[in-house]
Image (tube, rainbow, N blue to C red):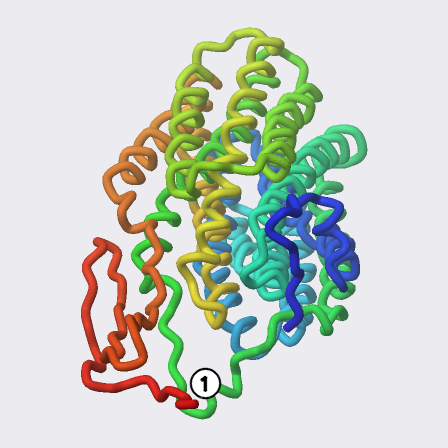
Amino acid sequence: MASAVTTEKSRPGYGQLLRTPGAISFLLPGFAARQPFAMLTISIVLLVQHTTGSYGSAGIVAAVTGVSMAVFAPQMGKLADRFGQSAVLVPVVLAHAAAVSGLTALALLGAPLWALALAAVPAGASVPQVGPMVRARWASRLEGSPLLPTAAAFESVTDEFTFVVGPVLATALCTGVHPAAGLVTEAALTLLGGLLFAAQRATQPKPHGRAAAAGEKHASALSIPGVRVLIIAFLGIGAVFGGMQVSLTAFSEEIGNPGVNGVLYGVFAAGNMIAGIACGAIAWKIGPRRRLILGYAALTVAASVLWAAHSPYLLAGLGLLVGLSIAPALITGYTLVEKLVPAATRTEAFTWLTGAVALGQAAAVTVAGRLADAYGSGAGFLVPLAATALAFATLVALRSKLAPKAPSRIVSASPTTPVTTVAKAAGGRSAERGVGHRVPVTVD
């Protein structure tokens, strides 16, 4: 697979990134196909709350959707790594459009909560993992390139742009056109964008199905300790998204202006997008592990004051700060995957992180919905605070797991000195192997 090449003196930038051969062909359809992650949860919350009158019920249905996505997303990533992205995407996109249509019909017919929750399972399980697949394409094409962190930042910006457009579009459709219009649009965009993205076979990473068929076994990405730590961090980020969605919706209802919900969430997502653009443009001098911890510390501090806001203007400002704090943590987490995970399981690793965001979002939607019903929107904002604080403490305690192992190297002092293979471990110790072998020397 071709990779982008940059010189030591050239500074990676977005323009150079977008000139990567084949990039535009998968970026444009991939943007449309990402709308499920931006529109699905808020569209379900708005529709189910409209038909049942309960944020708690809406949160349960949205949570089931998120949990189903979190459970099935890594399996989708494994299949994509083995058989190719296009082979997996086509049936998944068709299944998702059908599942969302079924959930919408049941909600409009006034089906009981258990039926809505049951229908939410296939709707969440079939969410196409286009974001991780795009990231895997970048990682494959930019293997070892300085442009890789720029690509991670670009993907975060793209994700957040969908979170600017998606919630605002879903809210406008659900409140201005019809309560089901958000889900209908989400299904249509998924179908169109997903099929177009699947058609871009030339840029997809090489499938590893042949190696598996030949008996080669690839360990799951979940077996890597650093990936498990990142999953915990991304659970907290997902809780911010879910808690903000429900709590901002409840806050908008409390002040008698439901339409402001999309604007408030858009400001929050815009902060994330702005920070993402900046992260991709900065030539960082500190390592990704330290950047992740510092970014998460800022996110925890910003989330700690949301509950105290009683003005839409103040809440918009605080939401902007939270959004600005998410991007550094999110981008750095995805960047670390390339350092921690081999290419054969990279799509799976990305889907574990995306699934963690969905699971954190689902849990936060459920808890924040209950709290908002019982105590008001201020109580719902406590969910992002608690989740980020717990995840930050875990990151600090297990930060050593995020250090990738250094590759083995060959050390030879002279042509007559025994060759020593030095395997550097994470703690800096080395083990010597192959003593007694000599390097052949040409004699004049």
Between residues 400 and 385, which one lies in front from this camera angle?
400
Q: Position of residue 292 (x, y in %)?
A: 42, 38
Q: Does residue 375 appear in the picture of this structure?
A: no
Give x and y (percent) for residue 364.
43, 35
Q: Is residue 414 above or below residue 172?
A: below
Depth order, front residue of 223/9: 9
Residue at 56% over, 48% down: 149
> In this view of the protein, which residue sits in the foreground, 393 or 385?
393
Q: Is residue 294 above or below residue 420?
A: above
Provide residue 388's location: percent of width, then percent of height: 37, 31
- Residue 160 in the figure: left or right of residue 286: right
Q: Residue at x 34, y 28 (%)?
A: 386
Residue linked to disc 1 = 212
Query: Which residue reaches farthest bottom?
Result: 214
- Callout 1 amino acid: Ala
Q: Residue at x 61, y 51 (%)?
A: 147
SS of the residue under disc 1: helix
Decide if residue 271 is on the left or right side of residue 360. Answer: right
Which image quadrant for residue 188?
bottom right
